């Protein structure tokens, strides 16, 4: 009789431990995703200032400005890591375009406002990369917990689901690692 009680208590304690470890991992992933969205929003908030600064020097480059504005809107509306990664890829291309336009205008490159915005973007890109690495590590930990025994038996019953990684296209990973190769 006592062995039955001990076995039941042990199973309950195991379930509590498994549940709590899954909750902690899920909260870490949610926090990491929140960090990414904060940094993406910060960068998106810098873009109108950058566009306005470049517009003052390059009024006839309307297509580039539209491309940047559209990419910014996609980034802000992304809800999942997959959507954010897709938006991130087009946003990086748009940023390359605006910096290419800036190359053609020496007065713009010398502008103190443009230099400050560029420095802010570099800082923000670094923070986005760090946030993405933290998110992917947290998602990996949660996904591993969900897949390993004995957690895998209970994770599905308790409603825990794997998280997708925030990955960029292979060709874009290098561009994001060096967001500002433009020489001013």
Image: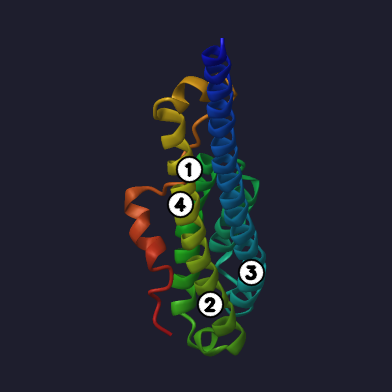
N-term-proximal mark, 4 vs 3: 3
Which element is circle 3 on? helix
The residue carrying mark 1 is 139
Q: Position of residue 46 (x, y in %)?
A: 64, 69
- Answer yes or no: is residue 85 visible: yes
The residue carrying mark 4 is 89
Q: Position of residue 180 (x, y in %)?
A: 43, 73
As measured in the structure, the alpha-carbon distance from the residue carrying label 1 to the one carrying label 4 is 21 Å
Q: Position of residue 128 (x, y in %)?
A: 52, 61
Q: In percent of the image, x 38 and y 74: which residue is there?
A: 181
N-term-proximal mark, 4 vs 2: 4
N-term-proximal mark, 1 vs 4: 4
Residue closer to the observer: 32 or 173: 32
Q: In percent of the image, x 58 and y 83: which residue is there?
A: 116
Q: In percent of the image, x 64 and y 58: which residue is there?
A: 38
Local packing at callout 4 (Cα closer than 10 Å; few below 14, some 14-19, many 20+) is many
- Answer yes or no: is residue 70 visible: no
In front of the other: label 2 or label 1? 1
């Amino acid at each position: 009789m006592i062995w039955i009680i001990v076995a039941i208590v042990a199973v309950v304690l195991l379930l509590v431990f498994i549940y709590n470890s899954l909750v902690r991992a899920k909260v870490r992933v949610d926090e990491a995703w929140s960090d990414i969205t904060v940094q993406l929003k910060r960068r998106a908030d810098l873009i109108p200032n950058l566009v306005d600064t470049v517009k003052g020097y390059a009024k006839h480059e309307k297509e580039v400005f539209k491309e940047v504005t559209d990419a910014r809107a996609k980034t802000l509306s992304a809800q999942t890591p997959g959507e954010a990664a897709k938006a991130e890829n087009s946003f990086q291309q748009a940023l390359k375009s605006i910096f290419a336009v800036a190359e053609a205008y020496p007065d713009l490159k010398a502008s103190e406002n443009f230099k400050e915005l560029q420095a802010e973007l570099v800082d923000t890109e670094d923070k986005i990369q760090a946030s993405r690495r933290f998110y992917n590590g947290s998602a990996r930990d949660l996904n591993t917990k969900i897949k390993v025994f004995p957690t895998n038996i209970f994770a599905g019953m308790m409603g825990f689901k794997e998280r997708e990684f925030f990955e960029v296209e292979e060709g874009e990973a290098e561009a994001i690692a060096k967001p500002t190769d433009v020489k001013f």
